[in-house]
Amino acid sequence: MEQNPDKSKRLRRGQRTAFAAAFVTLLLAITKGLVGYFCDSKILMADAFHSGADLLAIFAAGFGLWLASRKKTTKFPYGLYKAETFVSLIIGAFIVWAGIGILKEGLNKFFYIAQTNVFPVLPIAVSAISLIAAFFIAKRERCVGKAINSQSLIANANESFLDIFTSLVVLAGILLAYRKIPHIEGAIIILISLLIFKLGIENIWTSLLALLDANLSPGLQSSIAEEVNKIYGVKGVSEIKIRQSGPFQMVECKIMTSPSLALYKAHELADKVEDYITRNHENVESIFVHIEPVKEKAISAIIPVKDIKGLDSEVHNHFGRAPYFIIFRLDDDNINIEDFYYNEFLDEKKHIGIKVIRAVIKYKLDMLFTSQIGEISFHMLKDNFVDIYNIEEGITVKEVIERYRKGDLKRIAAPTHPVEEAESAGS
């Protein structure tokens, strides 16, 4: 039930960033509100409300990340990661409400012409400061948000970049209002209200999708499928489900493997898939791997042979010392020879079989047909989910396949000779 210390550290980093940004935004909102009130700048007061909406969103991110960093418990075994998403949803509703209120104010001011004759030095200065602050807040939020994969921080960063544009519009609006341009004050207030409304709707929509377990990471889904398919022993990936939980993802993966695979080997394969995904995708919090027997009938097999005569090639008496290997795909109706591999390790004295296995493992073999195999090679092949069948020396590849289809071949359950003999024979 313990929280992963690395993930807790990342969440705390996000909290610090969010709360620092919230504090700066709070100061800006108060300053804009006060200056706008005393200088009678309706545009600046509307922008103060805009900053207040940003403050709520940023605070929601920080509060959600704080909840998400709490330790897992028996009651909450998956942690409180979704707290960030839930809080963002609630705050999104408040932001929409604020946007509607400011829209009404903008409509009321649309035909109003400002009556100030004093050059608005203070409102302009506050808008300029706001513009600069928005840039640094956005840059920091985006950097940390991407580092810890916090969707709320990334969304707030995008909004902060938008604030740069808003501050420019506000700055221009204050100058144009001073010049008594008709409708400009109301128009800019309406524009700000629409931006606030947009922020709230986006927060609500993204939060709802996450809470309803929508697939928000199609790129990650494709990446995991491609990577898992490359793992030896995996015969296919039939389904991958990803749910967003705060800044992390929960992954369910259904993979196909050989139907003859022993239960303990299936568990080993599942552990290998889980370890691989966790190691290569740090934002994945948990993985559930379900193993199913492969439904396709085609298999990939290898046979040590004395010569290269296609299906008439004769079986060699030992795996490691065979001069050639025939590699083929087999189904109920067809036999497709994929390759003839020349044993380039015949002049070496030890562990030839191991070196051959390393060279041909790329074919993702399902079966080996051989008359003899050493202990190390045997266990290496079994570790790579290869079934080994016993055949006699001298028969042809075609005869081997016919016997296999009739069910006349027996699996080799143990090495045919121990390590000492295997080394001298090339394993």
Image (spheres, grey):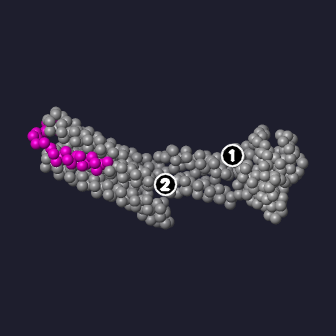
Seen from the viewer's position, the closer of residues 90 and 357 is 357
Q: CA distance from mark 1 to mark 2?
A: 32 Å
Report whether residue 409 is seen. no
Residue 182 image position (x, y, % from top left):
16, 33
Residue 195 image position (x, y, % from top left):
30, 42
Rendered image: mark on residue 295: 1
Give the residue at x 72% y 52%. Answer: 358
Residue 183 image position (x, y, % from top left):
18, 34
Magenta segment:
107-135
Q: Is residue 48 magenta?
A: no
Disc 1 or disc 2, which is closer to the eye?
A: 2
Element assignment for label 2: loop
State whether residue 268 is above or below residue 327: below
- Asked if the residue under mark 2 is in contact with the one under mark 1, i.e. CB atoms within 8 Å, the reply is no
Q: Main secondary structure of the magenta part?
A: helix
| Extreme-front residue of the structure | 347
| Extreme-top residue of the structure | 182
Element assignment for label 1: loop
Give the residue at x 44% y 57%. Answer: 81
